[in-house]
Amino acid sequence: MRRSIINGTGSYLPEKVLTNDDLARIVDTSDEWIRTRTGIRQRHVAAEGELTSDLATNAARAALDAAGLVPTDIDTVLVATTTPDNTFPATACAVQDKLGVPAGAMAFDLQAVCSGFIYGLSVADALIRSGQARNVLLIGAETLTRLLDWSDRTTCVLFGDGAGAVVLSAAEGQGSVADRGVLHVVARAEGRHRELLFTDGGPSATGTVGKLRMQGREVFRHAVNRITEAMEEVMAAAGVRAQDIDLFVPHQANVRILDATARKLGIAPEKVMLTIAEHGNTSAASIPLALDATVRAGRAAPGDLLLLEAMGGGFTWGAALVRL
Ligand code: UT7
């Protein structure tokens, strides 16, 4: 059976750091409130003129190096983002050009907000298993700070910029849970809740980009339930129990959401990979950022079983089981 294996990971965070104390000088907040309510200590902010495609290209280069591949090996560039360089063309086309991925490759963006990487994993895996692709660059990249209302303390303290990438390559497996690669993905949506987390603008609605708006408490409540459901679904489909999971690499939205979901599922706290303190919520970039940090810190070894999950605007949510 054909599988999509993670051949290499990479990530990139912009140089500029904004601490909680920096934010306390802009809005009525405090380091103490942000740390205890979210787990965030700082976030990175893209420099003026630094685009989502620049962040994505840097992360992709690192992932290619880790995989021992070159841009000419890539046949598909998939960028999960909510903050594309332009309304069109796709940021993936800019990444293709900046990286030197040959003409004729498939390149497109995918918009599922914070669930973008899970959705991207589902699509990339389907392309590989159907034989349409062999080496996919799957990138989550965001300049989310460009959508923030810096006078709204309920949102501007939460988000940051960054990018993470994986190279997914075709490989043969036995069709069992012992295989390396993407074992199972669930990707779900419920559009009737889209007013709980959205931008108040868009190309068709207003002709402007808009600012991010969120009813945080409501999103929190849905997030814990939906994430838990998706994780249970993906584990049941693969015949895996919580104790079989080596590492839990979640979307980094709020440390309290991650603690609550891990506790509900019986995943030990030391298996939960937490990077939110360093970069806040980077939307579609946060899972591959956490994954790359995990791999580079030597916390994950080949053969480890990883559980990934995310929930975001739409609502969209999902989970994936991947063996490194
Ligand atoms: O990645 C996409 C998915 N997004 C998420 O998963 C985010 C989910 N939501 C959350 O993470 C949390 O709901 C927040 C971190 C956004 C907020 O935490 P909360 O514990 O739900 O706080 P709250 O909204 O219930 O607000 C509690 C209090 C309020 O004051 P009052 O009404 O009790 O007087 C807020 O006005 O905290 C106040 N508050 C703040 N205080 C200081 C809200 N934001 C801030 C702030 N600094 N930045």
Image (cartoon, rainbow, N blue to C red):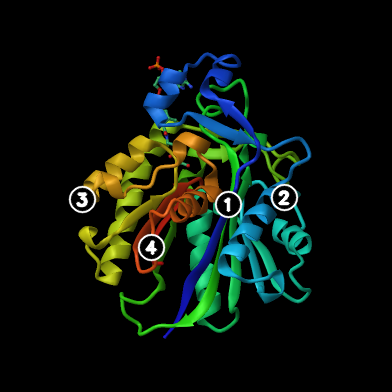
Which one is in front, 311 or 173? Answer: 173
- Other residues around mark 1 within 10 Å, as few (<14) / some (14–19) / many (≥20): many
Residue 246: image quadrant is: bottom left
| Quadrant location of the N terminus in the rendered image | bottom left
Name the residue located 54 percent from the left edge and 42 percent from the top edge. Answer: 282
Q: Mark 2 points at which residue?
A: 54
Q: Name the residue under label 4.
A: 301
Which one is in front, 266 or 208? Answer: 266
Tell me the kind of residue under disc 4: Ala
- Other residues around mark 2 within 10 Å, as few (<14) / some (14–19) / many (≥20): many
Tell me the kind of residue under disc 1: Ser
| CB contact under 8 Å: marks 3 and 1 | no
| CB contact under 8 Å: marks 2 and 1 | no
Q: Which of the marked residues, 2 or 1, is nearer the chain's N terminus?
A: 1
Estimate the x, y position of residue 111 in percent, counting from the top left.
59, 55
- 180 displayed left or right of 149: left
Q: Which of the marked residues, 3 or 2, is nearer the chain's N terminus?
A: 2
Q: Name the residue under label 1.
A: 11
Disc number lying in front (4 or 1): 4
Secondary structure at numbered mark 3: loop
| CB contact under 8 Å: marks 2 and 4 | no
Q: Which of the marked residues, 4 or 1, is nearer the chain's N terminus?
A: 1
Q: In which quarter of the image is ligand 1?
A: top left
Name the residue located 70 percent from the left edge and 69 percent from the top edge. Answer: 71
- Above or below: residue 142 compared with residue 154: below
Q: Can you tell which mark lies on residue 266? A: 3
Distance between the alpha carbons at the discs numbered 2 and 1: 12 Å
Secondary structure at numbered mark 1: strand
Q: Is residue 84 visible?
A: no
- 150 displayed left or right of 247: right
Tell me the kind of residue under disc 2: Asp
